[in-house]
Image (cartoon, rainbow, N blue to C red):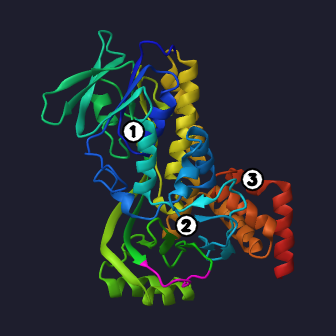
């Protein structure tokens, strides 16, 4: 696709939309990012990112991709005082209840512990500073316009603040409006089929609060993660953040939801938090009001299965796959999809959507399968025989990893999306698992 006289419109200025705009700037003459929210000047939250007030993790693979797309970003954030951890211990109680010491050895640069609003604000500043990119906030996308053939999207109908409806002509439209994006509705309105949807109902709810801990309360631990397990479907994340405070997010599945009252909230967390965390929370200064967020279902839209789809339209981010946020995969998956978008647009052609959605499916399916399998295990929902067998094997692998640094690193590499779950089936790994089980016996 030629760079000259081409215009792309990205709907949504969240992480997926900004990363899409960044890669499209390599091929398109102009990119317009349309965002319905009024965007803040600084690192404040906004209504369009309701999960922004909760703990976010940038996995190692996501950090590497951001470092490639924005070479100075991580260094600038570190210079800006964003907390960082490199090689230090992280307390991680996994989905089997085992505790692994999680270091930073798989990260090529320090692990930056930034809040979601701060990180998104930094990327928005860099993308908005590109000469070919315009970000138009407070602008609502109403629908799509197709050309005479009815098979190609040619424009987006938008309503800017205090203005009349406009037709924003585009050679390519990318919907990055998230899990509740309107593309399935717009497809039906234009006479196209909507994608099949896979869902797992988990009824997950978060409560998060900012807290200032006593200096040294956690020792040298900067990240605490406690995952839900069968019989105790609740967990927490405690991350140091910019601004000299920590952020505590407590979550629970299927009715086992954390309360918002402060004393009840702390008591709820103490039931499964490590003792040193409970002690730190009881001797802390709590900042501001609690923030709540509900995540009812994991959702996967199968655009790759559609036999008919309009040219000039793509979907990216949570609109393709909305994963349980407990796994921290969302931003990294969005970054992977941005690279797939870059590759697909570089080739161009009328089958752009077919190639992009096929590539995106290959990227998101391992994350989807891992997350939903664990969700079903924690909730006691039916699982396939393959899921049960693989899950039982992974349980034994994690048990062996408690005393095996090599296996612990492999577990971390899969969790950080640097390696696929199939890594666990390599002969060198299975032999170490067997040796670990024999030692335990």
Apparent side of residue 125 relative to residue 231 in the rendered image (left or right)? left
State the residue position of label 2.
377
Q: Is 276 located above or below residue 47 in the figure?
A: below
Q: Earlier in the sequence, mark 1 or mark 3?
A: 1
Prevailing SS of the magenta stretch: loop
Residue 423 bears which disc, if any?
3
Which is closer to the viewer, label 3 or label 2? 3
Residue 245, position in %: x, y?
A: 44, 73
Q: Which residues are magenta?
A: 212-219
Which of marks 2 and 1 precedes in the sequence? 1
User: What number of labels is visible?
Assistant: 3
Decide if residue 193 is on the left or right side of residue 273: left
Which dot, 1 or 2, sits closer to the camera?
1
Can I make out residue 301 in this image?
A: no
Calculate the distance from the C-alpha at mark 1 to the C-alpha at mark 2: 31 Å
- Which residue does the numbered mark 1 point to in the structure image? 176
Q: Report x, y in % for residue 41.
A: 32, 49
Q: Identify the residue shown where x is 67% and y is 69%.
A: 102
């Amino acid at each position: 696709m030629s760079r000259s006289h081409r215009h792309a419109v990205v709907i949504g200025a969240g992480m997926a939309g900004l990363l899409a705009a960044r890669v499209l700037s390599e091929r398109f003459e102009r990119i317009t990012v349309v965002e319905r929210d009024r965007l803040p000047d600084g690192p404040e939250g906004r209504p369009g990112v309701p999960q922004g007030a909760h703990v976010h993790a940038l996995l190692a693979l996501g950090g590497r991709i951001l470092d490639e797309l924005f070479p100075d970003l991580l260094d600038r954030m570190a210079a800006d005082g964003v907390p960082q951890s490199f090689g230090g211990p992280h307390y991680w109680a996994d989905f089997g209840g085992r505790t692994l010491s999680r270091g930073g050895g798989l990260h090529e640069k320090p692990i930056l512990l930034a809040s979601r609003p701060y990180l998104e604000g930094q990327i928005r500043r860099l993308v908005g500073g590109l000469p070919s990119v315009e970000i138009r906030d407070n602008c609502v996308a109403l629908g799509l316009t197709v050309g005479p053939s009815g098979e190609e999207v040619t424009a987006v109908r938008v309503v800017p603040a205090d203005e009349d409806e406009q037709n924003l002509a585009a050679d390519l439209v990318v919907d990055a409006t998230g899990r509740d994006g309107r593309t399935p509705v717009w497809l039906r309105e234009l006479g196209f089929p909507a994608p099949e949807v896979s869902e797992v109902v988990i009824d997950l709810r978060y409560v998060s609060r900012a807290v200032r801990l006593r200096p040294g309360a956690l020792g040298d631990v900067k990240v605490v993660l406690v995952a839900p397990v069968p019989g105790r479907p609740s967990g927490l994340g405690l991350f140091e953040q910019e601004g000299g405070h920590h952020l505590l997010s407590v979550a629970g599945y299927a009715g086992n939801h954390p309360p918002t009252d402060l004393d009840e909230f702390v008591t709820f967390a103490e039931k499964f938090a490590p003792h040193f965390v409970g002690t730190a929370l009881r001797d802390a200064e709590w900042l501001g009001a609690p923030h709540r967020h509900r995540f009812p279902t994991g959702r996967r839209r199968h655009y790759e299965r559609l036999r008919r789809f309009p040219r000039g339209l793509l979907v990216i981010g949570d609109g393709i796959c909305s994963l349980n946020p407990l796994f921290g995969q969302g931003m990294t998956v969005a970054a992977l999809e941005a690279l797939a978008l870059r590759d697909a647009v570089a080739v161009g052609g009328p089958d752009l959507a077919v190639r992009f959605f096929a590539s995106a499916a290959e990227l998101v399916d391992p994350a989807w399968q891992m997350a939903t399998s664990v969700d079903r295990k924690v909730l006691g929902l039916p699982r396939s025989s393959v899921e049960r067998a693989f899950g039982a094997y992974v349980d034994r692998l994690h048990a062996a990893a408690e005393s095996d640094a090599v296996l612990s690193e492999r577990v971390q590499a899969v969790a950080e999306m640097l390696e696929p779950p199939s890594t666990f089936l390599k002969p060198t790994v299975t032999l170490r698992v067997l040796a670990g089980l024999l030692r335990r016996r």
